[in-house]
Amino acid sequence: MPDWFTSLYDTEGLKQLIVAGGMLLLVAIVFAETGILAGFFLPGDSLLVTAGVLCAVNPLQPGEPAPLDFWMVGFLLSGAAIAGDWVNFWFGKLTGNRIWQRPDGRFFKRKYLVEAQEFYARWGGISLAGARFVPIARTFVPFVAGMARMPFGSFMFWNLAGAIAWVWSLLGLGYWLGGNEVLVKNLHYLILLIVAISFVPLIIGVLRRWLRKPVPVAAVESPAVVDQPAP
């Protein structure tokens, strides 16, 4: 497995990657996780928290200025998150039915589309904002919204709301953690806790599916069945 991939899931490795790659790497990861279906494995939550810490302190060179500016990071990553969902939405609108028929592969699992479809069908437009805080769901829900022909005005409202809430809350949390020396030293445990909490809605959804009567894959139609426009 490539070193850069394992670094994404290691706090110290992630710090090193962010410092080395700077804003370009941060923007690329946030955009890819929200805008490309194959980017579902990227660690958006831990990335934002770690970036917030690096806006407050320089853990690699104590006493030196922080390597990142909090406000610049917040605005640029908000833009990347908004643009990512926008691209994903149009991709779903233009190619959704064909993607739905694709077999499972290394970077694509049909079950993620099914779960995102159920999430969107239940919560409508607000699912776009809520999914920002749920790994995997934040990659697939905007795609499903595009397949479901969600009105563009509603999509952009929830896209903006979700991106701003997600980026600034986790970035701010990291910045606050960066001001506490004890918390910084135990950052890897805190990030693990944050990631674990973010997976709770996804785990609940999977358990609910298991408890329901299973639906044969052949019986699942294209997400165009989600024909109720979001409010």
Image: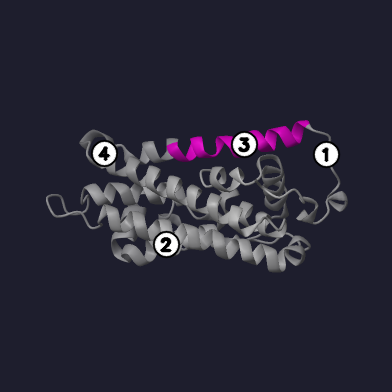
**Residue 102, image x and y in percent?**
75, 64
Q: CA distance from mark 3 to mark 1?
A: 17 Å
**Residue 188, image x and y in percent?**
36, 41
Residue at image position (43%, 65%) is 28
**Residue 96 relative to residue 213: left or right:** left
**Residue 66, image x and y in percent?**
20, 54
What residue range appears in magenta? 194-211
Q: Which mark is residue 214?
A: 1
Task: Give the number of the mark in front: 4 or 3.
Answer: 3
Q: Which residue does the numbered mark 3 point to in the structure image? A: 203
For label 2, the crowd category at 10 Å Cα-Cα, with few meaning under 14, some 14 to 19 and many 20 or more, is few
Mark 2 and mark 3 lie on one chain; the one further toward the N terminus is 2
Q: Is residue 10 visible?
A: no
Q: CA distance from mark 2 to mark 1?
A: 38 Å
**Residue 125 relative to residue 171: left or right:** right
Give yes or no for residue 15 being in the magenta stretch. Answer: no
Task: Give the number of the mark in front: 2 or 1.
Answer: 1
Q: Establish if 197 lies above or below 24.
A: above
Q: Which residue does the numbered mark 4 point to in the structure image? A: 185
Residue at image position (54%, 46%) is 129
The kind of secondary structure element at disc 3 is helix
Q: Amino acid at mark 3?
A: Ile
Q: Is residue 152 visible?
A: yes
Q: Which residue does the numbered mark 2 point to in the structure image? A: 4
Q: CA distance from mark 2 to mark 4?
A: 22 Å
Mark 3 and mark 1 lie on one chain; the one further toward the N terminus is 3
**Residue 152, image x and y in percent?**
62, 59
